[in-house]
Image (spheres, rainbow, N blue to C red):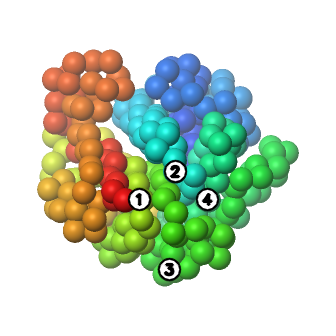
């Protein structure tokens, strides 16, 4: 990210979620604050989103990843987890919607300090007070110690926690991504839901063209995609960290679960994945 400016890709992801409310009526992921946090009406969000096919695919992927993470969080809460950490939160509105507040789920939002400051301005403009169970923790994953940042915010590292980490790994160096996974896995009973991409060469056909356009677009706003994982290597890294329970959805599996289409129609043209991992107690 360019110094002293908020993440432009965080705004893009938020716009996709807002447009999803208007264009697909939130069919995959319902978020009543998605438009308001951007200061847009649903019509304005849809107009800014436009009718481009590559944007439609990204919008549905972003809706699916949020749904995946929040569905997994429901399972975790049912298992007794009472701490959620949203890493690289951007304009994610989970903390505003927290459907588990009544059972005492605390939420920690971690983000780059510049983006978090902007998020807090956006909340102030919405005239929404930060919910009682929400604590902000400014952390730069490339420079700061995540565990220390969370400890300062009052996170209890002796208790299980669920980490939501969406749209962040592509923007991190492998060292920062693995250090973040290490900090997550150090928490007994930790769970994480995140998305990742395989290398550019794994995209096929039209999806390769859309991916190349994305690479150019995000590089131009100072947030180049530098992080990719190979599924088997990532599975091994997670297992080595003790996160032995895993579920990894590739493009066909995402299509089947969230878009109501046969897995075959997802082909393996896209190389984006959703993954959940847990370190059993
Ligand atoms: C594409 S946005 C995703 C935002 C949000 N998770 C979502 O899905 O809407 C990328 C996020 O990663 C954060 N990020 C990128 N590099 C970071 C770093 N080195 N330290 C902390 N956060 C970082 C950005 O501030 C931004 O919030």
Residue position marked by numbered label 4 in the rendering = 109
What number is the disc on residue 189? 1
Which image quarter: residue 268?
top left
Q: CA distance from mark 3 to mark 4?
A: 15 Å
For the image, the number of numbered tags is 4
Q: CA distance from mark 1 to mark 3?
A: 20 Å
Asked whether disc 2 touches disc 4, contact meaning CB atoms under 8 Å apart, the reply is no
Q: Residue at x 31, y 47 (%)?
A: 275
Image spot of residue 135 (x, y percent) = 69, 61
Q: Residue at x 27, y 18 (%)?
A: 261
Q: Earlier in the sequence, mark 1 or mark 2?
A: 2
Q: Earlier in the sequence, mark 3 or mark 4?
A: 4
Residue position marked by numbered label 2 in the rendering = 81
**Quadrant of the snapshot with the C terminus:** bottom left
What number is the disc on residue 218? none
Q: Residues within 10 Å of mark 4 (few under 14, many from 20)?
A: many
Q: Earlier in the sequence, mark 1 or mark 4?
A: 4
Q: Nearer the viewer, residue 243 or 138?
A: 243
Asked whether disc 1 touches disc 4, contact meaning CB atoms under 8 Å apart, the reply is no
Asked whether disc 1 touches disc 2, contact meaning CB atoms under 8 Å apart, the reply is yes
Q: CA distance from mark 1 to mark 4?
A: 19 Å
Image spot of residue 253 (x, y percent) = 24, 32
- Foreground mark, 2 or 3? 2
Q: CA distance from mark 2 to mark 3?
A: 23 Å
- Foreground mark, 2 or 4? 2
Residue position marked by numbered label 3 in the rendering = 145
Q: Residues within 10 Å of mark 3 (few under 14, many from 20)?
A: some
Q: Residues within 10 Å of mark 2 (few under 14, many from 20)?
A: many
Image spot of residue 145 (x, y percent) = 50, 80
Which image quarter: residue 204?
top left
Q: Secondary structure at mark 3?
A: loop
């Amino acid at each position: 990210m360019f110094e002293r400016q908020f993440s432009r890709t965080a705004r893009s992801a938020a716009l996709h979620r807002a447009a999803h409310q208007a264009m697909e009526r939130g069919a995959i992921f319902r978020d009543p604050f998605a438009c308001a946090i951007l200061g847009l009406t649903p019509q304005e969000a849809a107009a800014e989103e436009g009718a481009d096919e590559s944007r439609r695919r990204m919008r549905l992927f972003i809706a699916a990843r949020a749904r995946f993470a929040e569905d997994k969080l429901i399972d975790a809460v049912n298992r007794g987890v009472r701490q959620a950490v949203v890493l690289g939160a951007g304009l994610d509105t989970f903390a505003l919607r927290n459907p588990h507040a009544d059972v005492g789920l605390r939420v920690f939002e971690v983000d780059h300090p510049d983006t978090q400051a902007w998020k807090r301005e956006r909340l102030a403009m919405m005239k929404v007070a930060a919910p009682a169970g929400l604590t902000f923790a400014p952390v730069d994953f490339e420079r700061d110690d995540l565990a220390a940042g969370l400890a300062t915010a009052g996170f209890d590292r002796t208790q299980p926690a669920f980490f939501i980490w969406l749209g962040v790994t592509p923007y991190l160096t492998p060292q920062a991504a693995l250090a973040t996974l290490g900090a997550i896995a150090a928490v007994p009973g930790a769970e994480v839901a995140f998305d990742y991409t395989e290398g550019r060469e794994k995209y096929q056909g039209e999806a390769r063209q859309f991916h190349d356009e994305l690479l150019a677009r995000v590089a131009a706003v100072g947030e180049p995609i530098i992080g990719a994982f190979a599924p088997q290597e990532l599975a091994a890294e997670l297992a080595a960290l003790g996160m032995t329970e895993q579920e990894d959805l590739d493009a066909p599996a995402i299509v089947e679960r969230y878009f109501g289409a046969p897995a075959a129609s997802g082909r393996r043209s896209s190389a984006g994945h959703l993954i959940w991992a847990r370190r059993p107690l």
